Amino acid sequence: MLKMKYRELYCSSPRYWGGLASLVFIILIGLGAAFHMEHSGHYVTGMSNQIVWGLPHVFAIFLIVAASGALNVASIGSVFGGPMYKPLGRFSGLLAIGLLAGGLVVLLLDLGRPDRLIVAMTTYNFKSIFAWNIILYTGFFTIVGLYIWAMMDRKIAHLKRPIGFAAFFWRLALTTGTGSIFGFLVAREAYDAAIMAPMFIIMSFSYGLAFFIITLMAAYWWAGRTIGDLRLAKLKNLLGVFVGAVLYFALVYHLTNLYVTQHHGVERFILLDGGIYTSMFWIGQVLVGGIIPLFLLYSPAFTHSRFAIAVASLLVLIGGFFQVYVIVIGGQAFPMSLFPGKEVVESTFFDGVVAAYTPTAAEALLGIAGVAVSMTLVAIGARMLRVLPETLEDPQEGEAA
C-alpha cells in the first residue's frame, strides 16, 4: 500500500509570490470598481430596468456553480471509493470553498446595498428560492469545512464517509437551487424549464473539474512537485465525459423548447437572430467550450500532452462562461410576453423590444476580482494546510494510490 504524505505548499520562488501579488492587486482594483458602482449608482453600469442581472451576476453564478463541481473529486474518492482520487480530496474541498467564497463576494458587492445581506440572513421567506440559497450556501461552507477536517484529522477519520455523503447530497441541492432560480421564473420564456436544475448540475461537474485540473497543475508547477500521467489521464477523461454531457443537456433543452410553439420566438432569438448572444452560443459555448475541448481530450495526437489538457480545461471554462452569459443576460434581453397568446395594446416602454446591454469596465473588474478572490484563498489555504500530497506519481504495479 502506497502511503500518501501531505505537505503545505512551501513556495519561496518568485512564481508563487509574484502570482499572489498579482491576485491581490486584481482584488484591490475590483474593490475600487465596486466602490465606484456603490458610490455613483448603477447608472454607471450597463444594467437597466430590463437587464437587472449584469456581468457580475454571470461571474457570481459561474463561480458558485463551479464550486459545487470542484467537490466532485473528493466525492469520487471518499464516497464512491475511487483510489486514484482519494489523495486529491483535501484540495478538492479547499477549491470548492474558495470558488463559492469568490462567487458570493461578487454577488454581495453587486447588490447595490451589501448591508441588506443582514436582512436576508435573519428574515426568511421560505417561498423564495433565494432564501433557500442563503441556507444552502452557508451550509455548504460548514459541511465542506467539516469534510476537510475529517480528511485531515485521524481522530475523526471514521466520520469522513458519512460527512462525504452529506457533502455530496448538499452540493447537489445547492446546484439544484441555483438552477431552479431560473427554472422557476416562468415570466421569462428562456428560463421557464424544469431541465434547468439538472443541466446546472452537470454544468457544475464540468466547470468544477476544469478549475480543479488547472489549479492542481498550477500548484504542483509552483511547488516543483510531480503529477503522474495516469492521474491526469483519468481526470481528463472524466472531464471529457462531463463536457459531452453538458452539450447533450443543452441539446435536449433547446429541442424541448423548439417542440413547444410558445418558445419558438426565444429559440429563434438565441439560435439564429440574437446577434452577440447567438455568436456566444455557437462559437463560445458549442465550439470553444465543447467541440474543441473534446478533440483535445480524446484525439490520439494529444494523448500524452499536458499542455493540451490545460488548454482544454481553460477552453471549457471560457465556453462555460459564455453559456452562463447567454442564459443570464440573453434570457433577460428577450422581451417578456405579458399576456401569452393574446393581442394587447403595447406601450412605448420597451414592450416587444430586445433589451440592449453593454457591460462596463467596472462590472468586468468586479467579476474578475471574484475569480482572484477564489484563487487567492486557494493559494493561501494550500500554503497553510496540508492539502496536497508531496507527490502524485503514478502507483507502481501492485500498489494502491
Image (cartoon, helix red, strand yellow):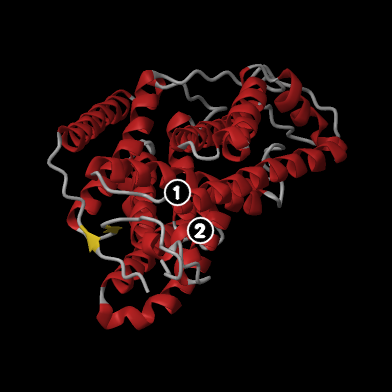
Apparent side of residue 160 relative to residue 383 in the rendered image (left or right): right
Residue at 63 percent of width and 49 percent of height: 241
Q: CA distance from mark 1 to mark 2?
A: 33 Å
Residue at 65 percent of width and 32 percent of height: 291
Q: Residues within 10 Å of mark 1 (few under 14, many from 20)?
A: some
Q: Secondary structure at mark 2?
A: helix
Q: Is residue 158 above or below residue 261?
A: below
Please identify, in this view, whether the residue under mark 1 or under mark 2 is nearer the observer.
1
Quadrant holding the C terminus: bottom left
Apparent side of residue 140 relative to residue 153 in the rendered image (left or right): right
Residue farthest left in this picture: 12
Apparent side of residue 274 relative to residue 163 in the rendered image (left or right): right
Q: Secondary structure at mark 1?
A: helix
Residue at 36 percent of width and 39 percent of height: 106
Observer-nearest residue: 322 or 117?
Answer: 322
Observer-nearest residue: 243 or 82?
Answer: 82
Q: Is residue 267 above or below residue 218?
A: above
Question: Residue 290: x percent and y percent?
Answer: 62, 35
Q: Which residue is mark 2?
A: 174
Q: Residues within 10 Å of mark 2 (few under 14, many from 20)?
A: many
Is residue 137 in sight in this rendering? yes
Amino acid at pointer 2: Leu
Question: Residue 132: x percent and y percent?
Answer: 49, 60
Could you say which quadrant of the image residue 110 lies in?
top left
Could you say which quadrant of the image residue 261 lies in?
top right
Question: Residue 202: x percent and y percent?
Answer: 60, 51
Amino acid at pointer 1: Asp
Observer-nearest residue: 116 or 177?
Answer: 177
Q: Which residue is mark 1?
A: 229
Is residue 184 in sight in this rendering? no
Q: Is residue 380 above or below residue 312?
A: below
Quadrant holding the N terminus: bottom left
